[in-house]
Image (spheres, grey):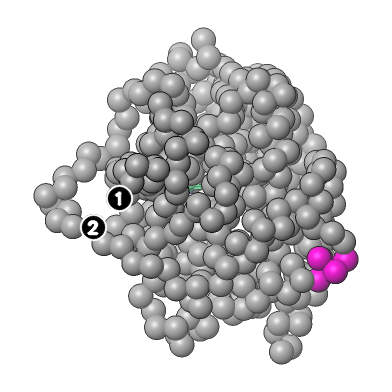
Amino acid sequence: MRSISVFGATGSVGESTFDLLMREGGAEAYRTVALTGGRNIERLAQMAVALRAEVAVTAYDDCLGALRDALAGTGITVAAGTQAIHDAADRPADWVMSAIVGAAGLVPGMRALRHGGKLALANKESLVTAGQLLMATATANEATVLPVDSEHSAIFQALVGEDLNTVERIILTASGGALRDWPMERLAHANVTDALAHPNWSMGARITIDSASMFNKALEVIETREFFGVEPAQIEVIIHPESIIHSMVGFRDGAVMAHLGAPDMRHPIGYALHWPHRQSLPVARLDLAALGGLTFLAPDEARFPALRLAREVMQTRGLAGAAFNAAKEVALDHFIAKNLGFMQMAAVVEVTLNRVSSDCSLGNAALTLEDVLQMDHLARIRAVEAVKMVKGS
Ligand code: NDP
């Protein structure tokens, strides 16, 4: 029986993963080593019982009592706190889903890779903050990293049987998010509710707002560079409002391979779960005649400064990704708290990158996990200062 663990089980990707696991027989088909969540204790406990998990972990110490009560008498071990999440990743499993949101997902993924096996990576922040390190750790431990972001799964699938040296370009599609059609002058006044109204995908709140600001696409551009090892100039972004083409790969003979499908995360999750095989998945089938047409638009970098910043980050590489992501997370926290305007998020990230690059050299090639975590910490301090600067300007 295959053993699995799901980090971030109670989130949007975690729920889709759980749905697939249950449809495939749940505890009769999989041995569940660890399930982790945050504050949604009731759901974490339900999932742990349904999958007969060996251990259920909440990221928050103050949630331990509630988790213990919810799982009393089940025989499931409970634990709480960041260290407990990291310890859960030390328990070997054949297939591990990394679906914690934010930089908090980095260490569990890195720890899971030490056992070899397969890491299904939804947590794009891992590749943005520590791409070189993560991929090197996978290689050193003969582990396989499987992309779960729909764009990267699409690229991965378009590359099956292909020689990476023949790839000319990778074209990432972007829906454009909830505010795609807003006039530029209105964007500055967009609030959280506006940014959460994603036209196609149902996702966690943070990634949905990041889609509207294009910070999500900025992270994905960096993720593409780190995962596939292509040069930054080979990565293009195109706005594709229907979210039917999940991404494309252009080859040196001019051919472009596109991956199409309904916008449903159970496709890339299911592909990663069964890779290298394809299994039947409960996703809607495309009706191209009903769709009628697909549209494409060039992204406007004035509207989406996040894309320009991602290019600068890729140029510097080293610790720049960790600083970029941390600053973005702080800016997003302040936007959600109504303490920062929508367009001010990019300004905070830019100011933070400038400030940390004067503190230390970001383009440091020999990174360790400790370096990355220290940069994450420093950039969060600088980003809080940047919020004050940007609001005061
Ligand atoms: P959600 O916000 O829906 O879920 C996040 C999960 O992480 C929840 O289980 C949450 O617990 C848990 N969590 C939150 N904070 C912490 C923390 N500090 N430590 C440990 N666990 C924590 O996120 P999504 O599922 O939308 O996204 C997860 C990851 O996948 C992100 O990196 C995102 O960019 C990526 N991704 C998501 C896609 C999507 O469709 N949603 C598509 C492609 C990539 P709780 O809810 O119990 O508090």
Relative side of 227 to 174, left or right: right
The residue type indicated by label 2 comes to: Leu
* Residue in the picture at 70% in, 32% down: 136
> Which one is in front, 371 or 7?
371
Residue 331 found in image quarter: bottom right
Indicate whether residue 21 is drawn in magenta.
no
Decide if residue 254 is on the left or right side of residue 82: left
Residue assigned mark 2: 294
Residue 244 marker: 1
- Taking 83 as reference, is 212 left or right? left
Report the residue that reaches farthest toward the right. 359
**Residue positioned 44% across, 59% down in the render:** 237
Classify mark 2: residues with Cα within 10 Å, few (<14), some (14-19) or many (20+): few
Q: Main secondary structure of the magenta part?
A: helix
Q: Which residues are magenta?
A: 355-359
Q: Is residue 249 above or below residue 165?
A: below
Give x and y (percent) for residue 170: 45, 48
